[in-house]
Image: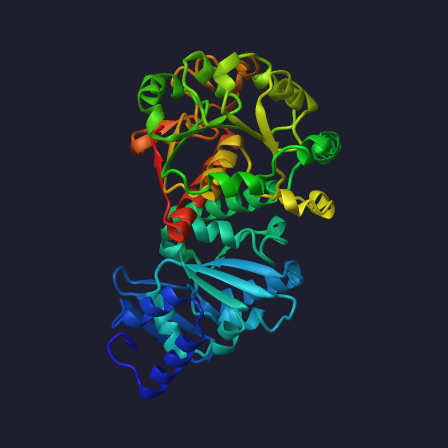
Amino acid sequence: MGLMMTSTPTQKELFNKNIEALSNILLKESLKEIKSSKFELILGKDNLDINLKDTSDNTFLYENAIDELNSMLNTYNDKYLLYPVLYFYGFGNGILFKALLQNKNHQHIVVFEKDIEIIWIMFHILDFSNELQSARLMILQTSSLDIEFFSNFCSSKPFFQFSRIYFLELMSHYYERFHEDILGLNKKLAENFKNSIVSYGNDPLDALQGIEQFVYNLPQMITHPSYKELLSKRKGISDTAIIVSTGPSLTKQLPLLKKYASKATIFCADSSYPILAKHGIKPDYVCMLERDEIVAECFNNDFGEFDKDIVFIVKPVTHPHTIKYLQKNNRAFILVSTYASFIQYLKLDYFGYFNMGFSVAHMNFLLTIHLKYKNIILIGQDLAYAKDGQTHSQGFIHANLHNGDYERDLDKFSTTAYGGNGKVQSSEIWTLFRHNFEKDIVNIKMNYHITTYNST
């Protein structure tokens, strides 16, 4: 039976019913546009014996549709009976999903499909409207999934809550032809689930240290200007911000930065601040969010008049030595909290909050958004090792602490180089930072019409 040529009024009605129940608008429109298919429908004597023949190479979706269905059902009822979420690559004939969803323990079945002609045919044959309408059956076209999807999906309920039992099942051997797509999808899901988990913290001792230091620094927070005051006075006063990080490439960027420093507002990381001071490049804002004592040493210096008019913005969980060094040299500073549960219980809403992300570069990035900059330029944001294995720019005060990092990470976290030319070596934490930057850059472009330029 070649469904791609003609379909009965009943089949058209069924297709429309399934389409109406589909919440995925992009997939809905793509399915509506299909007029014919390379697949031929093969119906057996049993109502469950539904197969598809790929006429482009004469291969079949299933070797034996009934046997494979029963085998899958036995496996899932035996091993995964209580799993709230199941993941499949390939829609197949869809019968397995209807059968599995009889089990109320399965809240969602998430199906990823590359060739939506398969879905188009099956939507003419079987009624999936109840499963689709309730969102217990979720169908996603792999080619339409972007950074924002993976980030949102992997951090939302119930997918995030049950991320540790995630695995991706192949519907049938037919789908092995899409092995590169499968591996890419699986990698992105695993990475984004991991990022979502790490965002909640990975060390209870770290959290306790943060609480202790927050309480210690609290008097300085409430006796200095608030974040709300900063925003009210500085918001929207300029269009272009340059965020200076301390990657290996910063060294070569310094002459250009010095030349154009007066044309933009400069935000810099704690570790790049001494480097800029050495080269006579004055930042407008310097941010710090880490809580370790060693990071506070970035401020253990005296640059005299250079510090005049610089605003130091510090997370209150930072080490007390940070505050000591700022006060010692009469630097202008404010302490700003993130949205942490413990901090919110203190009801210090008057002082304002902002989500600072994972790194000081993220903190600077989100600060520029709050201050309504329209163009954001990133420099020194390598998030990768230099060709000679260097982790940071020349002049980075803690370079010796990173000896051996390059050798430790070699070929474990490599990624595409700037401009798409070859590969660079990265680290696990830099990879996490990069993924979050990629997500945020897309988000602010879409929602705030802010353009980010990676000039690293």
Q: Nearer the viewer, residue 192 or 45?
A: 192
How is this picture coloured? rainbow
Q: Nearer the viewer, residue 255 or 178?
A: 255
Q: Quadrant of the C terminus?
A: top left
| Residue at x-position 49% and y-position 34% | 364
| Residue at x-position 34% and y-position 73% | 41
Locate residue 256 relative to residue 202 in the image: left or right: left
Q: Position of residue 28 (x, y in %)?
A: 37, 69
Q: Position of residue 325 (x, y in %)?
A: 63, 18
* Res 352 → quadrant: top right
Q: Nearer the viewer, residue 380 or 261?
A: 261
| Residue at x-position 52% and y-position 35% | 363
Locate residue 121 relative to residue 189 in the image: left or right: left
What is the count of numbered marks? 0
Q: Position of residue 173 (x, y in %)?
A: 42, 56
Is residue 355 visible in this depiction of the protein? no
**Residue furthest bottom as drawn:** 9
Locate residue 126 relative to residue 224 in the image: left or right: left
Is residue 410 visible in this depiction of the protein? yes
Residue 315 in the image: above or below residue 258: below
Q: Position of residue 205 (x, y in %)?
A: 73, 32
Residue 120 in the image: above or below residue 271: below
Locate residue 205 relative to residue 185 in the image: left or right: right
Q: Quadrant of the N terminus?
A: bottom left
